[in-house]
Amino acid sequence: MTKELCDAAKWQELIEIMSRLRGENGCPWDKEQDHMSLKRYLVEETYEVVDAIDRKNDVDFCDELGDLLLQVVFHAQIAAEEGRFTIDDVVSGISQKMIRRHPHIFGEAKAEDSAQVLSMWEAIKAQERATDGKKSEKRGLMKINQNLPALMTAQKVQDKAARVGFDWPDISGPEAKLQEEIRELQAAKTQEEKLDELGDVLFATVNLARFLNVDAEEALRHTVKKFVSRFEYIEQHMEEAGLQWGEASLEELDQLWDEAKGKGL
């Protein structure tokens, strides 16, 4: 590995810094933390990285990746203090996993496209589960992390089902299914029925997104940002005109919205 990719001294320095922060004469705040108290920071730093990617800001991207890496080292340090595993175990584990799950690169297997790679990945994971000594923990194909955002979870379970052949043959299937679910939502009477049917509409929408090769979570995030940008445009023009909310008609607000849209916001 080249010096540009990895400087062992810099890596070791980070590990030693965290060890010192958690040490006898270390930082009181750092010493008080445990895995549970750090969960929120791990999630927050992950989204900070995503935000920097969206903004295409390399300075912030580099900085936020460092913050996220710190969280990994922090958790590993706590585990090491408790005699459970070390950061070396973390790095070694992921390295071996990548080699094991890419036999078409590090072994004799063949994969012609991404679909074959993903299918092979699932097969290898299933084999790992069958031999990892945890057979008592039945872990089927749909055993997933329930803490993921709902849209991301929906796309993940649909991807998993598709990899084993449980999928529509073409995009006409999910298109028709979405229309069917919308009709059922329109026919819903009770609040419970509306909740159920709206969930079906969202799930069907995610399935359509998958066939369009669009990340549903990213698509909604993009639309929310677009809405906020246009709304802020309206808000700014109302302030400049000395207007309060409720003083402008819906037609005036729509006109400002169209102006914002015309400006590419």
Image (cartoon, helix red, strand yellow):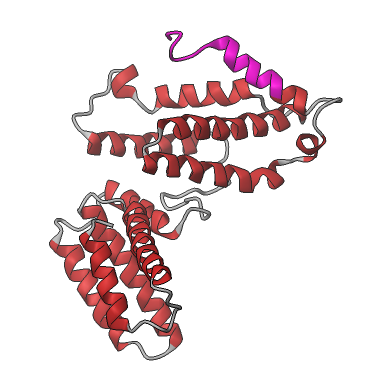
**Which part of the image, by quadrant, shows the C terminus?**
bottom left
List x then y, in percent, for residue 82. Answer: 77, 31
| Residue at 72 percent of width and 27 percent of height | 80
Q: Verify whether residue 6 appears in magenta.
A: yes
| Quarter of the image that includes the N terminus | top left
In percent of width and height, residue 202 lies at 34, 67
Q: Residue reaching furthest bottom?
A: 189
Relative to 113, is 96 on the left or the right? right
The image position of residue 252, as x and y in percent, is: 29, 79
Q: Quadrant of residue 117?
A: top left
Question: How far across and how far down the image is residue 182, in percent?
Answer: 26, 77
User: Please, is residue 241 above or below residue 191 in the view?
Assistant: above
| Residue drawn at 60 percent across, 32 percent down | 72
Magenta residues, start to end: 1-17
> Is residue 263 at least partly visible in the picture?
yes
Examine the rendering and report whether any part of residue 166 can be seen: no
Q: Count every numbered label the image shows and give the total.
A: 0
Left or right: 255 with respect to 68?
Answer: left
> Which residue sits at x=52%, y=31%?
63
Q: Which residue is located at x 15 percent, y 58 percent?
A: 171
Q: Nearer the viewer, residue 24 or 197?
A: 24
**Magenta stretch holds residue 103:** no
Rendering quarter of residue 199: bottom left
In which quadrant of the rendered view does residue 197 lie? Answer: bottom left
Whether residue 28 sits left or right of residue 206 in the image: it is right
